[in-house]
Image (tube, grey):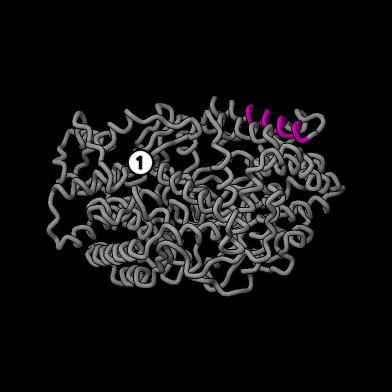
């Protein structure tokens, strides 16, 4: 169960539109800043105090903000489109989307079928007799459902995750990446951290495993749950940390198909790859070699029966949303209530749309764009992109610490950057995907396999540099450093981020900061490792690299001082990439705004820009949700993202921020990178 964090560097594995960030409604009545709080003491409270005091988090949410409202309104529009398509489909894919939704919404039919849809999957697991059969079953479960450059989406319940993308050293060709997986909780820390909260979650998770197995008809569910949990605990011990996963240089491990038996003994790799449809693939990148080696050893050392229990649980757990209500309620009891602190399950129609978005993301996106994304909105955002890229060009030109050779490659990255606005240039086809209006369970299984085969089909072909990684109906944005490309889906190009009728100050403080954020990911601690062609290589001089690392270290130190709770500080290293992008992106957006005003922006306009930016991050989170975010997410929580402003001289000038105020930084301590 995961909610995405605006904004990502890399593709989203699920198209569920649940934005983390809260924001003001641009073009609507603006909330007045809190007069009782000085902007220099707490700019987040200054901009958002009235909203924070008046807002309650809905019972079915772990966090809430105005962008959640935007996502929810977008979902209602999509629901209307899908319900209309059920009666009068405008295309085969629209008919598929309507059939998927219809099947999910027929709760009575799902209850009547009971666990019958599960039985074929569980019989396959029960038929495993030896470790070769286990390897075949593990290979058959492999799905292309992870992305290591995505701050939240590199954990899968399958033993390994597969990512199909261009090579780190060969950006022209697709290659399969193998990543760690196998956990039912979000991260290794949930298994290994000795805090009281994590200990309680481990107890709750083991009870959840037992409850799901009992609902599925298994005998001795508690004993099976204990075995499953112990296996996952051992997997967690060999997993890389989030910080290690963010180090792309540690991930660039090229293995041939023959290397696996030598470097990761214990798993019948020939049987695994054959069953996974990868028998003809002889080159891989093993993103987490320690985890792959450790997991293979566990395949050899742990009893086959334990692995069967593990496979059975994860099959039930993963597909539980399309099973009877008892399964749905139990999944929510752990993932919603215990893990995220959410009191109430989301409405069924919302969960149904999430499923459609997962199964047929671009089919839904095409319907949404045709109805709700006007050409003039696309044109205006494209012009803003041009202006903000120009601002980055100028900022790079003015850097006194960067050598000419490094500047040349940085400028080349901007010159060759592909920016997709609204929707992809080529739509994905779902021809051949069988979606039935009376088979909710089967629709999930077939759609996931269809997507997996689509991804496998890329192997052996040339990379499409303009391929999109987010559907148009998602309230989010992305930078893909290996493609040197950005995507800004249509759904984020509306209030609160962008409004055709809003002032330039608000639009540049809203979507402008988003655009700047994504562009700047090309030059953050990860993006800066890729050249203008998307190739992983060091294009920096030694002196430039040292300066960049020093500035980055200062930002790490700054964010590591922030405390979410008395016992929990932010992890400045984990959030470094996103903090760098916030800083550089906001600065470039402000430059572009000033240029758009002919260099005549007023102090009041600057204040509006900064307040608009701060209000775009207004968010309330439940304690459990916020703790999970601080522990696992590469993005700092919203409040502290707002504090990016304390590194910009213009903010001090706009609000007359003085020494002695809590956010004040002397000029020499303000982090300046780009």
How far from the left and from the top, in percent, is residue 529? 43, 62
Main SS of the magenta part reads helix
Q: In this view, does 246 lie above or below 203?
A: below
Looking at the image, which residue is at 77% across and 33% down?
A: 224
Q: In which quarter of the image is the C terminus?
A: bottom left
Q: Is residue 361 above or below residue 390?
A: above
> What is the magenta range?
204-216
- In this rendering, would 536 be left or right of 174? left
Q: Nearer the viewer, residue 161 or 263?
A: 161
Q: Which of 516 and 534 is in front in this view?
A: 516
How far from the left and from the top, in percent, is residue 482? 48, 65
In this orientation, does residue 161 appear? yes
Q: Mark 1 points at which residue?
A: 559
In this orientation, does residue 672 appear? no
In this rendering, the count of numbered labels is 1
Q: Is residue 350 magenta?
A: no
- In this rendering, would 117 be left or right of 646? right
Q: Is residue 211 magenta?
A: yes
Q: Is residue 132 above or below residue 370?
A: above
């Amino acid at each position: 169960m995961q909610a995405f964090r605006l904004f990502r560097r890399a593709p989203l594995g699920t198209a569920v539109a649940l934005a983390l960030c809260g924001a003001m409604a641009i073009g609507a009545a603006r909330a007045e800043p809190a007069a009782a709080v000085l902007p220099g003491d707490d700019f987040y409270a200054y901009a958002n105090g009235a909203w924070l005091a008046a807002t309650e988090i809905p019972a079915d949410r772990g966090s809430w903000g105005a962008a959640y409202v935007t996502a929810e309104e977008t979902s209602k529009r999509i629901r209307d489109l899908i319900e209309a398509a059920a009666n009068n489909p405008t295309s085969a894919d629209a008919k598929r989307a309507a059939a998927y939704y219809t099947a999910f919404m027929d709760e009575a039919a799902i209850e009547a079928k009971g666990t019958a849809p599960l039985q074929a999957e569980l019989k396959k697991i029960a038929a495993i007799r030896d470790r070769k059969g286990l390897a075949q079953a593990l290979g058959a479960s492999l799905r292309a459902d992870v992305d290591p450059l995505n701050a939240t989406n590199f954990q899968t319940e399958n033993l390994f995750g597969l990512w199909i993308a261009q090579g780190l050293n060969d950006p022209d060709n697709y290659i399969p990446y193998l990543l760690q997986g196998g956990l039912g909780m979000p991260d290794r820390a949930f298994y290994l951290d000795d805090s009281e909260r994590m200990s309680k979650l481990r107890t709750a998770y083991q009870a959840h495993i037992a409850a799901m197995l009992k609902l599925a008809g298994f005998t001795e569910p508690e004993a099976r749950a204990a075995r499953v949990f112990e296996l996952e605990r051992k997997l967690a011990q060999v997993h890389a940390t989030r910080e290690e996963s963010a180090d792309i240089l540690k991930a660039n491990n090229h293995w041939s198909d023959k290397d696996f038996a030598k470097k990761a003994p214990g798993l019948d790799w020939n049987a695994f790859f054959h069953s996974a449809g990868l028998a003809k693939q002889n080159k891989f990148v093993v993103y987490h070699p320690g985890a792959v080696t450790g997991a293979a050893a566990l395949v050899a050392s742990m009893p086959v029966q334990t692995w069967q229990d593990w496979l059975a649980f994860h099959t039930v757990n993963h597909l539980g949303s399309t099973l009877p209500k008892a399964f749905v309620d139990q999944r929510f009891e752990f993932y919603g209530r215990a893990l995220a602190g959410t009191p109430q399950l989301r409405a069924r129609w919302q969960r149904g749309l999430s499923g459609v978005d997962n199964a047929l993301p671009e089919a839904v996106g095409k319907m949404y764009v045709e109805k709700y994304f006007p050409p003039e909105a696309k044109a205006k955002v494209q012009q803003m992109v041009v202006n903000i890229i120009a601002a980055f060009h100028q900022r790079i030109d003015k850097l006194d610490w960067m050598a000419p050779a490094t500047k040349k490659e940085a400028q080349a990255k901007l010159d060759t950057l592909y920016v997709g606005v609204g929707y992809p240039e080529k739509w994905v086809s779902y021809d051949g995907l069988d979606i039935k209006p009376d088979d909710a369970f089967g629709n999930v299984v077939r759609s996931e396999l269809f997507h997996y085969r689509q991804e496998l089909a890329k192997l052996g072909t040339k990379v499409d540099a303009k391929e999109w990684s987010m559907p148009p109906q998602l309230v989010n944005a992305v930078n893909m450093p290996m493609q040197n490309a950005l995507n800004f889906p249509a759904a984020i190009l509306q209030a609160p981020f962008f409004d055709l009728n809003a002032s330039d100050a608000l639009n540049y403080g809203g979507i402008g900061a988003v655009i700047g954020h994504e562009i700047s990911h090309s030059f953050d601690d990860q993006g800066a490792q890729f050249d203008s062609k998307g190739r992983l290589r060091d294009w920096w001089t030694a002196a430039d690299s040292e300066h960049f690392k020093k500035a980055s270290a200062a930002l790490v130190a700054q964010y590591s001082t922030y405390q979410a709770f008395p016992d929990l500080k932010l992890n400045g290293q984990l959030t470094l990439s996103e903090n760098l992008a916030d800083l550089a992106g906001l600065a470039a957006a402000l430059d572009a705004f000033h240029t758009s005003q002919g260099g005549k922006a007023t102090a009041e306009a600057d204040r509006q820009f900064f307040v608009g930016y701060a209000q775009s991050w207004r968010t309330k989170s439940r304690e459990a949700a916020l703790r999970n975010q601080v522990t696992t997410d590469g993005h700092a929580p919203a409040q502290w993202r707002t504090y990016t402003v304390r590194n910009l001289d213009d903010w001090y000038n706009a609000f007359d921020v003085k020494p002695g105020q809590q956010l004040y930084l002397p000029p020499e301590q303000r982090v300046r990178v780009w």
